[in-house]
Amino acid sequence: MTIDEEPRCILCNGPSTDDNPLLELRGWIRTVLEQDGMAHYPCMARMANNAAFSKGDIPWDISQPHPALVSLVETKRIVPGRVFEPGPGLGHDVVYLASNGFKVTALDISKKAVSMLRKRVEKLGLDVDLIVGNVLRDSPTEGEFDYIFERSVLQTLPPTQRANYILRLAEMLKPTGEYIGIIRGPRIPMPESQPYAFTRYMIEQLLSTQFRNIEITRVPSGFNNSQSEYFLVIACRR
């Protein structure tokens, strides 16, 4: 590229735009894609996740529904209703919710992940709506859901994408709807690439633009239940 050429995404060759800027490939994504350079976040996320699911190398998968979600259902803190889950991966939480009376819609940027999950829910005879797409652009109709549950999306998003993500989630909820998130807690030092980590203050600042009554409690990661290194976040739509 000469000095006069506009930088372009190394994965799709598209230009940088205000709503889809180019970002440096770093951390886990750089490792999975085995590339250096600048790319749009949706491009890198889609390609990296497809590669991870194809290889069976899924570092965020805990092989079970998250214990905090199970507790919310068993204590009836949340009751059957419509749930949207972005980034379901292999779908442990999707299967658990659908098996307990929830009407689940799930969206993943990885076509491979959705294909694997579709086969799983069909085998189990569960009624789940599955979508391949970018949560910021391909989410369902606004105001449909009683709950949004997420465990693996926010920690992957660079700072430039987070406010739009939270806005989109709020728009999908009914006026009385609740956001439920399992969010990676602080690390020393704080990571500069995904998976990112969050302090309580960072979570409150991010959610408070669209949500109220924000509850934040420590919960296990799901990998090792003796380590309370994540946050369970519950918040009501404003």
Image: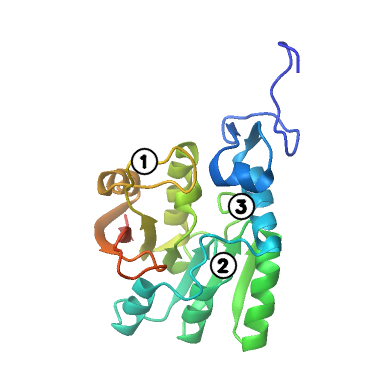
Q: Which residue is mark 2?
A: 106
Label 3 crowd bin: few (<14), some (14–19), many (20+), radius 10 Å: some
Residue 228 location, x and y as percent?
Answer: 29, 63
Horizontally, is 159 left or right of 122 in the view? Answer: left
The alpha-carbon separation of the residues under discs 2 and 1 comes to: 30 Å
The alpha-carbon separation of the residues under discs 3 and 2 comes to: 11 Å
Q: Secondary structure at mark 1?
A: loop
Residue 125 location, x and y as percent?
Answer: 63, 88
Q: Residue at x 74, y 16 (%)?
A: 5
Q: Secondary structure at mark 2?
A: strand
Residue 21 visible, this angle: no
Please determine whether, in this image, residue 135 is positioned above or below residue 10: below
Q: Secondary structure at mark 3?
A: loop
Residue 132 location, x and y as percent?
Answer: 66, 61
Counting residues from the N terminus, which is met first, the one under dot 3 or under dot 1? 3
Horizontally, is 21 left or right of 8 in the view? Answer: left
**Closer to us: mark 3 or mark 1?**
1
Label 1 crowd bin: few (<14), some (14–19), many (20+), radius 10 Å: few
Q: Which mark is residue 134?
A: 3
Residue 58 location, x and y as percent?
Answer: 58, 61
Q: In the current view of this chain or complex, which residue is farthest to the top?
A: 3
Q: Residue at x 34, y 72 (%)?
A: 68
Question: Label 3 sits on what residue type?
Answer: Asn
Q: Which mark is residue 190?
A: 1
Q: According to the image, what is the colour scheme of the structure?
A: rainbow
